[in-house]
């Protein structure tokens, strides 16, 4: 049995090679008894379960094929696709999981997060996140026609890119104190997250004992997978 962890695929119609790589990964690597955790930002943007293009449908169909094979897929909301909802889960067969959540691997509890809430030094982003995650904002957004939602999402992405140009890499990375606070809260020694697009395995001391933080890579120019079967291995999947 192998458990796979991925994040930050940012699948979209403009990068069809990455979508093909993901579907190929699902088809070739996941076998009966395996499971897959997607820790946010499976899609570049998700503006509602009613706005499905051919690329998104291909991904949904691929996930549904895993469901039919009884291979579980667990998906966490990211900062780009937090509007994934019940229609998506019904069509794909995937299960939405909370951010954060704790799973047990062997005899060890592991904390899973998307990772954006750990970037506490980026005060502007955290304020924006609170705004767009507000249920009233989400309800109003989803009430608009699809064309208007596309325009609003495009505007948000452009504003995000503009803001990012003015910020240092350190500000947009996770805050170590926030990491340690989250791990202490959930009583874990291992945290797995995405969002920062900086794949690595960090080792440090927490309450006097060894602790680990594993960061998943993005899928912009290749695939990035964390594989677990008694130990963790970060892999790169070439296009």
Image (spheres, helix red, strand yellow):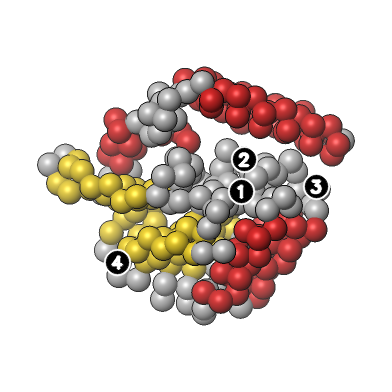
- Upstream in sequence: badge 4 or badge 1: 1
Query: Is 188 positioned to the left or the right of 24 in the image?
Result: left
Q: 220 or 110: nearer the eye?
A: 220
Q: Quadrant of residue 27?
A: bottom right
Considering the numbered disc 3 on the image, is that residue within a helix, a strand or a loop? loop
Question: Disc 4 and disc 2: Cα gap in Å?
Answer: 30 Å
Mark number, residue 151: none
Q: Nearer the observer, disc 4 or disc 1?
A: 1
Question: Disc 3 and disc 4: Cα gap in Å?
Answer: 39 Å
Mark number, residue 10: 1
Q: 166 or 87: nearer the eye?
A: 166
What residue is disc 4 on? 231
- Upstream in sequence: badge 1 or badge 3: 1
| Residue 130 showing in the rendered view | no
- Upstream in sequence: badge 3 or badge 4: 3
Q: Do residues under tags 2 and 1 come within 8 Å of each other at their CB atoms?
A: yes
Which residue occupies 51% across, 74% down? 29
Which residue occupies 68% across, 53% down? 15
Which residue occupies 66% across, 32% down? 157
Residue 130 placement (x, y as % from top left): 56, 25
Question: Disc 1 and disc 3: Cα gap in Å?
Answer: 16 Å
Q: Do residues under tags 3 and 4 come within 8 Å of each other at their CB atoms?
A: no
Q: Is residue 208 above or below residue 154?
A: below
Residue 52 placement (x, y as % from top left): 79, 52
- Upstream in sequence: badge 4 or badge 2: 2
Q: Nearer the observer, disc 1 or disc 3?
A: 1
Residue 201 placement (x, y as % from top left): 31, 51
Mark number, residue 80: 2
What residue is disc 3 on? 51
- Upstream in sequence: badge 2 or badge 3: 3
């Amino acid at each position: 049995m192998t458990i796979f962890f991925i994040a930050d695929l940012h699948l979209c119609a403009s990068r069809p090679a990455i979508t093909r790589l993901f579907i190929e990964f699902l088809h070739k690597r996941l076998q009966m008894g395996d499971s897959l955790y997607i820790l946010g930002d499976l899609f570049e943007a998700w503006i509602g379960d009613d706005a499905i293009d051919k690329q998104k449908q291909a991904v949904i169909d691929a996930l549904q094929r895993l469901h039919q094979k009884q291979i579980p897929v667990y998906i966490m909301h990211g900062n780009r696709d937090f509007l994934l909802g019940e229609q998506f889960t019904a069509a794909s067969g995937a299960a939405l999981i909370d951010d954060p959540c704790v799973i047990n691997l062997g005899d060890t509890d592991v904390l899973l997060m998307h990772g954006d809430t750990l970037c506490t030094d980026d005060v502007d982003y955290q304020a924006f996140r609170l705004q767009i995650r507000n249920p009233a904002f989400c309800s109003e957004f989803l009430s608009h026609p699809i064309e208007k939602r596309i325009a609003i999402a495009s505007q948000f992405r452009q504003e995000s890119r503009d803001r990012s140009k003015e910020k240092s890499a350190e500000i947009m990375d996770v805050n170590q104190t926030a990491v340690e606070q989250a791990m202490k809260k959930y009583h874990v020694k291992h945290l797995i997250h995405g969002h920062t697009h900086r794949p690595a395995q960090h080792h440090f001391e927490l309450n006097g004992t060894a602790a680990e933080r594993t960061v998943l890579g993005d899928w912009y120019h290749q695939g990035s997978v964390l594989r677990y079967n008694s130990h963790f291995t970060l892999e790169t999947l070439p296009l």
